[in-house]
Amino acid sequence: MTGTTEEKVALRDRIIGVLLQDAREQAGKTKRECAEALGVSTGTITAYEEGQKSISLPELEVLSYLFEVPTPHFWQRDAKLISREEPSPLQQVLNLRHRIVAALLRQARLEADASQKELAEVLGCSASRISSYEYGERPIPVAELEILAQHLGVSLEYFLDNQEGPIGEWLWQQEAYDYFRKLPKEMQDFIIRPVNIKYLEVAMRLSQMPAGGLRAIAEGLLDITY
């Protein structure tokens, strides 16, 4: 790596490490539990927390899930916590997420019309390393993924799990809860009352209707009124 990139990655690793240790301790989890979730040694967890080793995004997602902390917490400071059901086997989720992130990286590179050599120059590494990232042969450190994402014109959230997986569903629940909390108090009260479910269902149906259908309903209501 070039000096500038190396320093940037090292700094991000240290910041993420501090946040990881804090989140783990707040969740009451041991390094052993984290190591078992990721299928690594406790020494690797220590290296992550001390910023001596880069963690991959899928690993970060799994630990976020384990700690009940939103993944963006590790690069944003305004994320909210939310409860979730018991997870699926985390090792299976982790392996799948590594492959998905690899495929998304390749897709983003192709859409940006960039070569593996170009990305290698951005990170200051070999093109074969980029190839191993894209084929899921090795985890992509999140600090490097952040740099590649910026170069390819996508956000780091582009690589996050979507709603199809257990982590993605959990993230969606967090976002939904966050949106709900931002609603006016009277609207929150209206939504949570079971008696108002029918009104919400009608509103959902109306929102899916074309403009012509809504106009016909409005005209019908006017005829009844007048």
Image: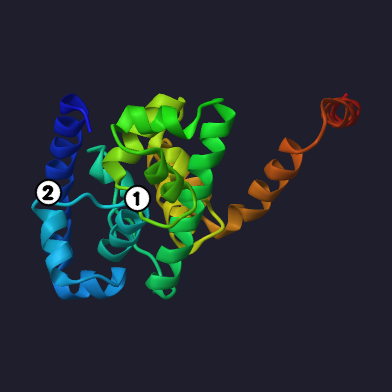
Q: Secondary structure at mark 1?
A: helix
Q: Is residue 186 above or below residue 122?
A: below
Mark-to-mark CA distance, 2 and 1: 15 Å
Find disc 1 in the rendering and name its residue. Answer: 57
For marks 2 and 1, the one nearer the N-term is 2
Answer yes or no: do the residues labelled 2 and 1 have beta carbons within 8 Å?
A: no
The x, y position of residue 194, in whole percent, is 56, 59
Residue 176 appearing in the image: no
Q: Is residue 56 above or below residue 225?
A: below
56 or 64, nearer to the observer: 56
Task: Count the marks.
Answer: 2
Residue 51 numbered tag:
2
Q: Secondary structure at mark 2?
A: loop
- Packing grade of label 2 (10 A; few <14, some 14-19, many >=20) is many
- Packing grade of label 1 (10 A; few <14, some 14-19, many >=20) is many
Q: Residue at x 17, y 56 (%)?
A: 23
Q: Residue at x 45, y 25 (%)?
A: 153
Left or right, 82 with reference to 97: left
The x, y position of residue 59, in whole percent, is 32, 58
Q: The C terminus appears in which quarter of the rendering? A: top right
The x, y position of residue 64, in whole percent, is 29, 57
Left or right, 8 with reference to 138: left
Q: Residue at x 38, y 71 (%)?
A: 90
Q: Is residue 170 above or below residue 125?
A: below
Question: Could you tell me the amino acid type at mark 1?
Answer: Leu
* Residue 197 lies in quadrant: bottom right
59 or 78, nearer to the observer: 59
Left or right, 38 with reference to 87: left
Query: Tell me, what colour scheme is on the image?
Result: rainbow
Question: Could you tell me the amino acid type at mark 2?
Answer: Gly
